[in-house]
Amino acid sequence: MEISVVAIGGGTGLPNVLKALKDEVKNLTAIVNVVDDGGSSGKLRECFNMIPPGDIRNCLVALAQNDDLAKLFDYRFGSELGCHSLGNLMLVALLKEDGDFLSALRKAKEILSVKGEVLPVSLEKVVLKAELKSGQIVTGQAKIANTFGIKKVFLEPKEPKVYSYAVEVLSGADLILIGPGSLYTSIIPNLLFTPLVEAINQSNALKVYVGNTMIQRKETLGFFASSHLKAIYDHSPNVRFDIALFNDFTSTQHLLKSYLEQEIFPVEVDLIELEGLAGKVVVSEVADRSDLRRHDPLKLREFFKSLLEEKCLFQPEPRKI
């Protein structure tokens, strides 16, 4: 389809959205967060004074048309090589060769025959910080992801430069997708860049929020569907979604039992509280039945196709879980 789609996020959620769309639209762009400081990305970030490569690598792999090389990029070494993925190391090697991350990214796209664009939200090394309800300040994405009672998150430096091309592509978007992903450490950090938020607000694109299927043990413990949207709006008051999509667990109740026993809880869709938080709330089964914590790219593809074809923007009233 001759439609431009921009998906914003990070972590493991954004790649599933990209997989769902890469064969459906010709103009697909991922805008990826750059606050990761854990694991391989954190080590490479510090050693080579670069933006973290992990989330960007995940998106490159999701959009790759060369499946064999994509699998190699995703290969992760053991502790003897620092538990780095080959793709992360390739991005470091390309960076060292060219001295420029954007050049390294372009070469990686060529190697993988990537369909679409993968853009960092910023080329600056930014640090994510959180203020807890207790008043305590927690520094670093990895620590924040394992923290309960987050009041707000913010970036240091306070006004980091956004990558200008990432802002530019939003002006021509027909559909802007945000989520799924870790609320405070993958989604909201992108929305702390003022020019990006302004571009989203000024765009005439359909704006869709794809909600998480499960609550995160620490970061969003006790959150309902409405809590996620309210947290986004608290950080970016001018952002509003035309559609908010949440998973319907009605037909997978029998699969939920094992998750509940592990104290992994679904995001409950509290329809009354959601009133006024999005133009339309859609509840549809979009979770992967082999892992209810993740979205199924094929199910997302059908949902997005229906939006792009303008066939079912308005569904029957969703059922409450």
Image (cartoon, rainbow, N blue to C red):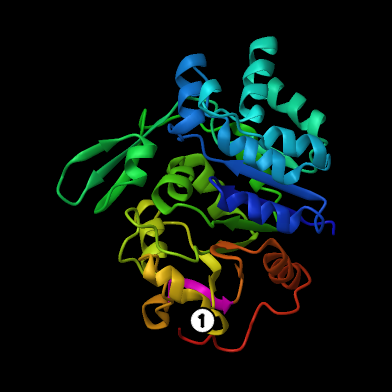
Residue found at x 66% / y 42%: 59
Q: Classify residue 303 as left or right of residue 194.
A: right
Residue 319, given in percent of the width and then of the height, sits at: 51, 87
- The reply to whether residue 91 is visible in this rendering is yes
Where does residue 206 sit, x and y in percent of width and height? Answer: 64, 63
Q: Residue at position x 73%, y 39% from top?
A: 71
Q: Which residues are magenta?
A: 276-284
User: Considering only vertical position in the picture, is 137 above or below 257?
Assistant: above
Label 1 sits on a secondary structure element that is: helix
User: In the drawing, does residue 38 fall left or right of residue 316?
Assistant: left
Q: Amino acid at mark 1?
A: His
| Image side of residue 138 versus residue 273, left or right | left
Q: How many marks?
A: 1
Rendered position, 29 above or below 16: above
Spot the residue most to the left.
134
- Magenta-drawn stretch contains 306: no
Instruction: Please give the residue where the numbered disc 1 appears in the rendered image.
Output: 254
Quadrant hosting residue 25: bottom right
Asked whether 127 or 88 is in front, the reply is 88
Quarter of the image where one finds residue 72: top right
Q: What kind of secondary structure does the magenta stretch mostly adopt?
A: strand
Nearest to the observer: residue 290 or residue 239: 290
Residue 83: where, in percent of width, then height?
Answer: 53, 29
Observer able to see residue 161: no
Say whether residue 15 is left or right of residue 69.
Answer: left
Label 1: few (<14), some (14–19) or many (≥20) C-alpha neighbours in 10 Å: few
Nearer to the camera, 188 or 47: 47
Image quadrant containing the C terminus: bottom left
Give me the residue at 74% from left, 49% from top.
28
The quarter of the picture where the N terminus appears is bottom right
